[in-house]
Image (cartoon, helix red, strand yellow):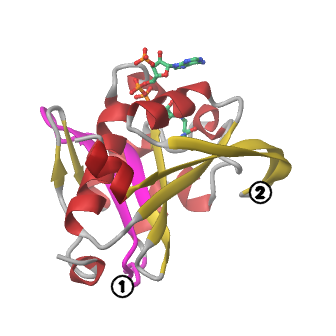
Amino acid sequence: MALADYIYNKPIIETERLILRPMTSSDVPALNEWMPDKSIYTYWGKGPSKSEKNPELMFEKESKPTKSFHLGIAEKGNNKVIGDIWIYLIEHDRMAQVAVRLSKFVHGQGYGTESLSAITRFCFENTELKRLWTEVDVRNSASCKILEKCGYVKEGMIRQGRMVNTWCDYYIYGILSSDYNHGE
Ligand SMILES: CC(C)(COP(=O)(O)OP(=O)(O)OC[C@H]1O[C@@H](n2cnc3c(N)ncnc32)[C@H](O)[C@@H]1OP(=O)(O)O)[C@@H](O)C(=O)NCCC(=O)NCCS
């Protein structure tokens, strides 16, 4: 498989406790419970957008065909979406950025690690991506922790740089498919 195979059919990725899957308008009640919550945007680089404040808007227009993934993170037992995860800003089918966030009601249960680890594995096993990376505000300890647990390497720190729409000290974390295979 390659990124091009997922343009119209996004993957469904199963872990022990979670299903990472495309979202539909039937997920709006679940999204309303956490997506507008300002506390998850503290280190996100920007506050909630119009559609994050009102998730119904996310499903008004058909999404454009793209190689990027934006998947909901659902609990297996009840299929309720409690977070979301992205593979985006794909460059030359070789490098992409990753981002994850979860409802504050489920923080600290290992779901962040479980989702990030699953999407990382998926990308290296099922696409041609060679590098995944992200920017993390140095104060975002939970995020640093999950990245490190999933094998991402802290590659450096940018001092007072622009992270999305904020200016802060932030780390660059990255993982290569070769790091990943060596870790097996
Ligand atoms: C980052 C995020 C996805 C982590 O999800 P999670 O499910 O709580 O993560 P996990 O439970 O898998 O692991 C969190 C780890 O961070 C640790 N942690 C949590 N808060 C911490 C803090 N303030 N200081 C230090 N460590 C912290 C936990 O103890 C845990 O480590 P452990 O397993 O060794 O005990 C979640 O905090 C989140 O959604 N944050 C808001 C959005 C965000 O900032 N996303 C990242 C953008 S790059």
Q: Would residue 100 be seen by someone viewing this image from the given angle?
A: yes
Write the residue at 54% across / 34% down.
Answer: 143
Q: Could you tell me how many numbered marks the image carries? A: 2
In this rendering, is residue 178 above or below 173?
Answer: below
Magenta part of the chain: 61-86
Residue 126 vs residue 22, the one in the foreground:
126
Residue that sits furthest to the front in the current view:
182
The image quadrant that residue 126 belongs to is bottom left
Secondary structure under tag 2 reads: loop
* Residue bearing mark 2: 165
Q: What residue type is labelled 1?
A: Pro
* Residue bearing mark 1: 65
- Confirm or reject: label 1 Cβ below 8 Å from ligand 1: no
Within the magenta stretch, is there residue 67? Answer: yes
Secondary structure under tag 1 reads: loop
Q: How crowded is mark 1: few (under 14 residues within 10 Å), some or many (20 or more)?
A: few
Residue 8 vs residue 93, the one in the foreground:
93
Write the residue at 44% across / 62% down.
Answer: 131
Write the residue at 50% across / 44% down.
Answer: 35
Residue 182 vs residue 26, the one in the foreground:
182
The image quadrant that residue 154 belongs to is top right
Residue that sits furthest to the top in the current view:
108
Q: Which amino acid does label 2 sit on?
A: Asn
In this rendering, is residue 182 above or below 131?
Answer: above
Q: Would residue 82 be seen by someone viewing this image from the given angle?
A: no
The span from disc 1 to disc 2 (Cα, nearest Å) is 26 Å
In the image, residue 118 lies at what x, y percent?
26, 46
In the image, residue 20 lies at what x, y percent?
25, 50
Within the magenta stretch, is there residue 179? Answer: no
